[in-house]
């Protein structure tokens, strides 16, 4: 499902990040761990096709995003990658409903109505659709962001430090929710974290350790 | 959701900044549209009123004053000329047509002009109702005068002495309306036309002619005057020699309208250029303001934009999103600005004295106004260009991580 081989990325005027090889079957959960500066975000960006690797092979669901044209890569990302950033990152200018509709805007494809309704029901968002983002609690915002990430039934769900700003109770709830929804969507879950609570919430997960890049 | 609806929502997510930018841009559009329209209408009106007139003959004085009073009826005439002198000019081989004009009275600020039917023919004007005057003290109203005064066929009115509507009324000599002209979009629209003899008759009594002896009356008859005359040449070559002949060989003055109009429009042009520059400055300020607003919006919305990229939105659609935001603002300002400019023109037309009201008219489209949307949309697009360039270079992952 996710396969990397001798994957490297060199930033202009920056360090070269060399990643360990990986073969992660579809539906598995992967923990991406390592100290700050080890290239976790760069690895996620490479996986999402936002960056192209300097060297090596990266394959996601049988596709090498680096070989796609820019426009194809954007379209591929819209369909195959779900992304759950820290604190949800929802647009404060829009309502909950419009934040979810951004997924359709991004891919220029209408949403599957039944799947949309299923996620709304499952994540308990029915009463929140017309609310503005500042009217949501942290937990509600996370559920909206999770629904947005799963609307396209992605092959891979990337969660970047999902528990960073949460207290213990909410962190546990968030990780349970993310794990359950990824399983329900049959998506490969990749969690980039250095939070021990997130690690403990995913006991059977495979871990990819990244070392700090040499200066 | 499409780019237009999304940009609209983003635009109104900052209502204060949006309203201020809209106001600034609207003011710029209004100023520019107003100046362009007013200049175009005044120039066009002057050129139209001058067509077919090669020279204006009148008393010696300022040639511009002669043109302004004789052709456009916007100024007081410099004096009178003797009818006999004019008849001498009629015999001149270079003169094809002479139309005498006698001014002196007004109807509610609209000038009463004693003339011949040739004056109506000069502009190709047609009667909407009735017929031309057949004898003295019959009058034909211009279309605008008829509308403005509400007078109709067969009704009577008295002229007021001078060109000021508050002057003394000639109560003893009422005019009867025999005709109303169809709108000609020329100076005739705002004139009351009658026979030259009507003007003489009204003023003879004013000067107490009834009490004069037959000799004195005969003397006045022999010394009849008109205010000025409009002349058409047989050949354009006369433009070189005829004015010189009149100015040096007679005690009258010949003014060449084309020459004087050029001088007048140069003077007018300096004023309108200042106003136009002011309008353009407002537009540039508005563009700068939009640029600052969009730049700030990109900064504020960096994470939104990064998230949109992450969701699969191509960078060029984000550029389109910003451009749409700027252009939507510009289009809204265009609509408001063009409407405001028309309202301003209508207000100006209302404020102008009665005799000059047809110089400016609202709701008249002119191709020169195409410059307004062109300039406003170009400036809006330019204002969006730098923020759009920045959007294309967003470092998506660091922005998403930063927050």
Image (tube, coloured by chain):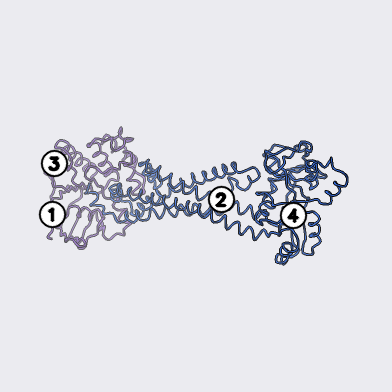
* Residue name at image x 73 percent, y 58 percent: B252
Tell me the element at label 3: loop
Q: Is residue B264 left or right of residue A116?
A: right
Image marks 2 and 1: residues in contact by CB distance under 8 Å = no
Tell me which chain the residue with mark 4 is part of.
B
Residue B151 lies, with reference to residue B36, above or below; the image says: above
Q: In this figure, which residue is indicated by the disc labeled 1?
A: A210
At label 3, counting other C-alpha atoms closer than 10 Å, the crowd grade (few under 14, some 14-19, many 20 or more) is some
Q: Which chain is blue?
A: B
Which numbered mark, 3 or 4, is in the foreground of this view?
Answer: 4
State the separation of the CA atoms marked 2 and 1.
69 Å
Q: Residues within 10 Å of mark 4 (few under 14, many from 20)?
A: many
Real-space Cα separation, disc 3 to disc 4, in angstroms: 104 Å
Q: Which mark is residue A201?
A: 3
| Displayed quadrant of residue A165 | top left
Q: Is residue B319 above or below residue B233?
A: above
Label located before the other in sequence (3 or 1): 3
Dots 3 and 2 on the same chain: no
Count of numbered circles on the image: 4
Reading the chain from its start, which is encountered first: label 2 or label 4?
Answer: 2
């Amino acid at each position: 499902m996710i396969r990397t081989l001798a994957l490297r990325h060199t930033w202009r005027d920056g360090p070269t990040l060399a990643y360990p090889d990986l073969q992660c079957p579809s539906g598995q959960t992967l923990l991406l761990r390592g100290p700050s500066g080890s290239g976790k975000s760069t690895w996620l960006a490479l996986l999402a096709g936002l960056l192209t690797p300097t060297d090596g092979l990266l394959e996601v669901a049988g596709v090498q995003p680096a070989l796609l044209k820019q426009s194809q890569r954007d379209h591929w990302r819209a369909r195959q990658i779900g992304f759950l950033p820290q604190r949800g990152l929802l647009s404060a200018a829009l309502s909950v409903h419009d934040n979810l509709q951004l997924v359709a805007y991004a891919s220029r494809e209408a949403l599957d109505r039944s799947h949309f309704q299923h996620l709304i029901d499952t994540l308990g968002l029915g009463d929140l659709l017309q609310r503005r983002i500042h009217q949501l609690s942290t937990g509600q915002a996370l559920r909206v962001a999770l629904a947005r990430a799963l609307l396209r039934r992605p092959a891979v769900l990337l969660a970047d430090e999902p528990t960073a700003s949460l207290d213990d109770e909410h962190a546990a709830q968030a990780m349970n929710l993310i794990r359950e929804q990824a399983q329900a969507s049959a998506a490969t879950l990749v969690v980039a974290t250095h939070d021990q609570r997130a690690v403990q919430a995913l006991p059977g997960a495979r871990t990819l350790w990244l070392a700090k890049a040499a200066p | 959701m499409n780019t237009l609806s999304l940009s609209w929502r983003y635009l109104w997510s900052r209502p204060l900044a949006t309203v201020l930018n809209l106001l600034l841009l609207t003011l710029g559009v209004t100023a520019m549209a107003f100046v362009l329209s007013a200049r175009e209408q005044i120039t066009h009106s002057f050129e139209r009123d001058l067509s077919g007139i090669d020279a204006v003959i009148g008393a010696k004085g300022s040639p511009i004053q002669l043109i302004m009073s004789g052709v456009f009826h916007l100024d007081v005439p410099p004096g009178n000329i003797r009818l006999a002198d004019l008849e001498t000019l009629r015999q001149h081989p270079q003169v094809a047509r002479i139309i005498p004009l006698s001014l002196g009275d007004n109807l509610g600020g609209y000038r009463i002009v004693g003339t011949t039917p040739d004056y109506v023919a000069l502009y190709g004007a047609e009667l909407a109702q009735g017929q031309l005057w057949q004898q003295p003290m019959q009058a034909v109203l211009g279309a605008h005068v008829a509308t403005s005064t509400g007078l109709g066929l067969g009704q009577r009115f008295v002229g007021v002495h001078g060109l000021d509507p508050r002057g003394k009324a000639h109560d003893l000599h009422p005019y009867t309306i025999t005709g109303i002209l169809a709108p000609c979009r020329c100076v005739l629209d705002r004139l009351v036309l009658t026979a030259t003899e009507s003007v003489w008759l009204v003023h003879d009594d004013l000067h107490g002619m009834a009490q004069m002896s037959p000799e004195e009356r005969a003397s006045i008859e022999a010394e009849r005057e008109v205010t000025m005359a409009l002349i058409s040449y047989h050949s354009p070559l006369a433009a070189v020699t005829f004015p010189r002949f009149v100015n040096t060989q007679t005690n009258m003055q010949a003014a060449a309208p084309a020459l004087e109009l050029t001088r007048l429009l140069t003077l007018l042009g300096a004023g309108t250029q200042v106003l136009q520059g002011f309008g353009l400055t407002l537009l540039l300020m508005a563009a700068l303001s939009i640029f600052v607003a969009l730049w700030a919006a990109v900064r504020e919305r960096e994470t939104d934009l990064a998230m949109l990229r992450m969701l699969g939105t191509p960078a060029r659609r984000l550029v389109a999103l910003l451009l749409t935001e700027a252009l939507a603002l510009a289009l809204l300002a265009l609509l408001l600005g063009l409407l405001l400019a028309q309202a301003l023109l209508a207000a100006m037309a209302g404020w102008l004295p009665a005799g000059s009201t047809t110089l400016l008219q609202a709701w008249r489209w002119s191709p020169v106004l195409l410059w307004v949307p062109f300039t406003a949309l170009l400036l809006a697009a330019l204002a969006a260009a730098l923020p759009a360039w920045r959007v294309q270079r967003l470092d998506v992952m660091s922005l998403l991580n930063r927050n």
